[in-house]
Amino acid sequence: MSLGASKAVVQVLCRPVTQTGYSEHLVNSSDLTLHSTFQVKCVKKRPPRHRHSIRCSSMHLSQLRRTHQLRPMGVSLVNYMNYSGSWFQTCKCQQSESASGITAGDGNGAWSVNNIETSNSVNNLANAKSILEFQDVQQLKQEKALTSKIANGTIPDSFSIEEEAWDLLRESIVHYCGSPIGTIAAKDPTSSNVLNYDQVFIRDFIPSGIAFLLKGEHDIVRNFILYTLQLQSWEKTMDCHSPGQGLMPASFKVRTVPLDGDDSATEEVLDPDFGEAAIGRVAPVDSGLWWIILLRAYGKCSGDLSVQERIDVQTGIKMILRLCLADGFDMFPTLLVTDGSCMIDRRMGIHGHPLEIQALFYSALLCAREMLTPEDGSADLIRALNNRLVALSFHIREYYWIDMKKLNEIYRYKTEEYSYDAVNKFNIYPDQISPWLVEWMPNKGGYLIGNLQPAHMDFRFFSLGNLWSVVNSLATMEQSHAILDLIEAKWSDLVAEMPFKICYPALEGQEWQIITGSDPKNTPWSYHNAGSWPTLLWQLTVACIKMNRPHIAAKAVEIAERRISRDKWPEYYDTKRSRFIGKQSRLFQTWSIAGYLVAKLLLTDPSKANILITEEDSELVNALITANPRGKRGRKNLKQTYIV
């Protein structure tokens, strides 16, 4: 038997049923009512005000765990010495997609399956056999060459990296009441000081949830959405001050505690953190926004719209919107927040109206408008939502955008203008233009600045805000292409040896001391101060796919694969060119793992990115044209519905 024929037989015999990370029958749409009833019985027992948590009795939980406990189906490559060679042979068989397919390399470390069509005619069998034998010879040559390159470190084994990533992601799954509910932030075996990295963070779970959705494993995302909804703030207090009804926690932890009134039994408790235990004591603004985005992605990917149509879920959406749309003293349509209220959760000079929050806010408004069920009680909320979308979109596109043309305009600004016709509306002084920006700004390309307030423009490039503005169409088509143009033009600064810089450039010297408070973790080119975060790969990939430029993301993923597994999946990288693992970086960081997996899955099937993308609304475009005050300045604009 030829080598090709024998491989085909082995592939058929060894091909298993597709593995999943947990039992599919734990929670599904068919037992929605039962699950909700059980949840009410466990949840409605309110703890004291100072401890807002969800409890679940485990008197019969041990039996559930013995029957349904979720365990990783794969084996971590970190512990590969504990497993026999026969296991790896089986694992290799699982990679086959077709019994008649011949696996071959494309020269870039990516693999594809070429199906060889053979005729049922007896006369063609000999020709087919010759073709297979010829393909076998060619494949052996390619495999030997590739093996040599992998051994030398020239090309990484992307199959083994993905397998390892999936094993690690599934090992990070957290369970509650016998069901998967999320993933912990990091599982670093080399660190004994876990801080809060053993908790489930809402923002950190987003790439994990997207990865599971793309893999067809929907239950963990559904559970996460519903259980975190139960933790939403109703009466939570922080140092006697309410953080606002509708606030979502930054994170939560599953704790096992003695059952009230029965020391012989225990119960599981979901204990949330709204920022009262966080470093800096900052409430998370982005948690609720990410929750809405994930809820929409779940519905679009799974087809299960019953979750977003539930009364409690609809109420949760409205509470988040009312919290964000509440009237205040701010005159701008952007969301006013404190420093450290998003992914950059330490003092970094982003207080005010940081771009990241505005991009997520805009995306959450669009997703909520799509999911809200029409009813009389929500008419005013939807009207306010639409008005805010128009005003926010115009404000960001007009005043946050910077390119060489706009930079020249700012350079020649007149100041101290008082009138409705003022060009320099925010009284920006041209001396704010930093020397680094004059040299760094390319002739082709542009980006949205990090922050805008009276007499202040933060010209730093913040990656997540710019990438998500492309994904959700907050930036125009021209601006979106210009952002990707800038990324390509400044590749050595923003990507270098590990994607992707969280911001650029770093705060240094006295500026660093004043703005960060001499934060030893945010030293220049480290952590949030222009460190490189591999988790940003997935946002980069979605943005590139939307603009039909996936080659940019593919190049970034290829760079990451050269060392991210070897470096044990760190949280972030340090130095200007990302050459060192972060000095305080956790290893086996879950969202670094999940970000890589989402990028790989989307590059394999770009159409799946539609669960995250929001296209520009034609009605919104028309409203923007109407609201544009150019050429219509004057007191009469005070009657405008939109604040621009």
Image (tube, helix red, strand yellow):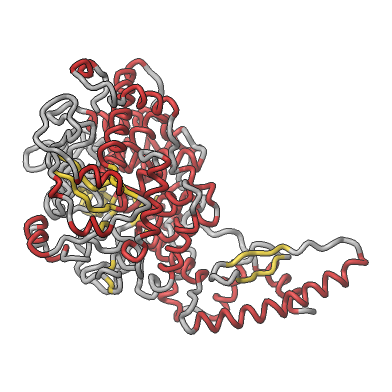
Image point 89% across, 66% down: which residue? 124
As drawn, is 496 to the left or to the right of 518? right
- Give residue 427's quadrant in the image: top left
Image point 14% across, 63% down: which residue? 508
- Front residue of 8/223: it is 8
Q: In this picture, is 302 found above or below 463?
A: above
Image point 23% across, 56% down: which residue? 438
Position of residue 196 measured from the top left corner of the image (x, y, whole percent): 21, 58
Position of residue 206 measured from the top left corner of the image (x, y, whole percent): 36, 50
Position of residue 513 measured from the top left corner of the image (x, y, whole percent): 7, 61
User: Where does the N terminus fall, quadrant-wise?
Assistant: bottom right
- Front residue of 255/368: it is 368
As drawn, is 424 to the left or to the right of 28? left
Position of residue 168 measured from the top left corner of the image (x, y, whole percent): 40, 65
Residue 60 visible, this orientation: no
Q: In this picture, is 62 found above or below 474?
A: below
Residue 508 visible, this orientation: yes
Q: In this picture, is 353 found above or below 570?
A: above
